[in-house]
Image (cartoon, coloured by chain):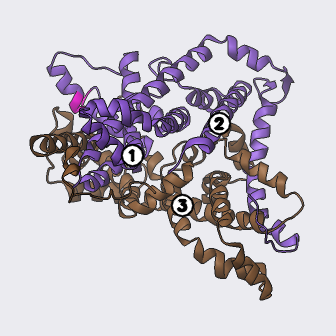
Chain colours: A brown, B purple
Amino acid sequence: MAAPERKTQGKLPAAGMVEKRGSALWMTHALMILGVLVVFFPIWLAFVASTVTQPEIVSPPMPLLPGGHFVENYTRALFAGVNIPVATMLLNSLVMALGIALGKIAISLLSAFAIVYFRFPGRTTFFWMIFITLMLPVEVRIVPTYEVVAGFGLLNSYAGLIFPLIASATATFLFRQFFLTIPDELAEAARVDGARPMRFFVDIVLPMSRTNIAALFVILFIYGWNQYLWPLLITTEPEMNTIVMGIKQMFPSGDDTADWPVIMATSILAMIPPVIVVVSMQKLFIRGLVDSEK
Amino acid sequence: MEKRVTFKGWLLPLALVFPQILISGVFFFYPAGQAIWQSLFIPDPFGLSSQFVGLGNFEYLLSDKYYRASFLTTAIFSTLVTLVSMVPALFLAVMADRLVKGAGTYRTLLIWPYAVAPAVAGVLWLFMFNTRVGVVSWYLGQLGYDWNHVLNDGEAMGLVVVASAWGRISYNFLFFFAALQSVPRSVIEAAAIDGARFWTRFFTIVLPLLSPTTFFLLVVNVVYAFFETFGVIHTITSGGPQQATTILVYKVFADGFVGQDLGSSAAQSVILLVVVGALTVVQFRYVEKKVHY
């Protein structure tokens, strides 16, 4: 587990030896706060820009404190947008992120269960097949994958957005690792009781995997939400744009001035869902991160 | 490792793996096979037929000065992204580790940028450095520095590096912080009793103990810089000025979709495939041996 609480040895005088006191402690806090401010500055600036007017931005320097046009800019972004209302793009992103997260978890749970709890013809081949899919990000095979999706007539569809991105085996591997740690006695008992495999899967394996499923959900949701290249290729109609790829489409081509307040409001809207997921499920997120990189 | 207790039957397990086989087959193996196949051909200008050229596409690519330049650009870019994302993260993690109280709060705040998509990060940094309205570029102008990443190669590279590294600082911070928290206190206290000052302890004891984490992060950050920074580059520079920020993944896109040079794009995909394969092997071999969390 990441970041376990360090056991404080506060009662022993020696403990103070390596912990900072007084001015050094304040110095450390000051450096941390400075670090946080620097890291946060781009987000802060985007937020400020989303609350002021276009003339305030285009005559630099723009203000560094929020203005009074929050409601106006966000309403304009959500319900008018530039090419398409941002509310539509948010919905598309939500469908895509949920589809990828839930779809990948579902097919991986099933196949990991089969690999761990059965001996069937082709099992080893299958295992190596999914191992290979671990290695190739979609960025590397974009042209042929695009052709396949176009061939099925799936351009500008949710299926086209979702399916190619669930064709990777990270989740299968994670579940396999976890299922291997489930005590054999449980399967033995289920078998003796005459329980069918799927009964065992639903009653025992699924409930035991709850935490892993949740941790993986957090990681996959963010992965799906933050996709850029793939939606850029296969959504040619603005109605199907996702918010992350749609922001770039809001910049005018040529020399016109971009509608900065609306673009920045959209950027803020694009980061709110993943930030909420990460911050509110911090423990699960860190666990998922550490697990999925192992 | 294998289960000793298994269920009987083969129809059910085949049905269970079927969805994954189907999706991987249609959207992964077939396209990957196509990429390899297409890399051996040159389509005619009308796309009606194509001519078998064997390894001709690869020979052409490797002698193409733009492709070689893209390799160099990628090397510089990924080295810089790795450095710029790891060094500040390590510094912040060391600072947070010195705190008994408040470290959790800082961690919560520092996680934020990780959730921001690379493409959105690109837009945020573009906004700050925009040549007409950017706040940072304006203040640089006041200081007498004329910032223009649209024309200046080095500034364009600097901007995409910083925008790409920004979100990764969160990620690296989490791993470094977790690793620092698991460094045994007794070792550090023993060194303190021997009179070693903070930075001496850091460089002689803590840093060597962090080396498994550091190496792991090196590999994953290089993989990130190679394959997941497309959004940053597309939003900020679109590979320009000229080709100054065209990394390999961007070139696959630019040649395949913009330039419609399918044979070359497919050959580039195959080369990248080899690169990913090598990086994955390094990662797996290493992870199996050393990383303990």
> Residue extending furthest front?
B194
**Do marks 1 and 2 share a chain?**
no
Q: Residue A267, percent across and down?
A: 35, 48
In the depicted view, which residue is nearer to us: A228 or B159? B159
> Residue extending furthest right?
A121
Element type at marker 2?
Answer: helix
Give the mark toward the camera: 3 or 2.
3
**Do marks 3 and 2 share a chain?**
yes
Q: Is residue B52 rendered to the left or right of residue B97?
A: right
Q: What's the distance in space between the residues labelled 3 and 2, CA to CA?
A: 24 Å
Please name the residue shown 44% across and 41% down the image. B119
Q: What's the distance in space between the residues labelled 1 and 3, CA to CA?
A: 27 Å
* Callout 3 crowding tier (Cα within 10 Å): few <14, some 14–19, many ≥20: many
Looking at numbered disc 2 in the image, what kind of residue is underneath it? Val
Please name the residue shown 68% across and 35% down the image. B277
Q: Residue B191, percent across and down?
A: 30, 37
| Residue that label 1 marks | B183
Element type at marker 3?
Answer: helix
Q: Give the range drawn in magenta.
A: B132-136
Looking at numbered disc 3 in the image, what kind of residue is underneath it? Leu
Q: Mark 3 lies on which chain?
A: A
In the depicted view, which residue is nearer to us: B109 or A271? B109
Q: Is the magenta stretch mostly helix, strand or loop?
A: loop
Mark carried by residue A216? 3
**Of the residues under marks 3 and 2, which one precedes in the sequence?**
2
Q: Residue B5, percent across and down?
A: 79, 72
Q: Residue A123, percent across and down?
A: 84, 58
Looking at numbered disc 1 in the image, what kind of residue is underneath it? Val
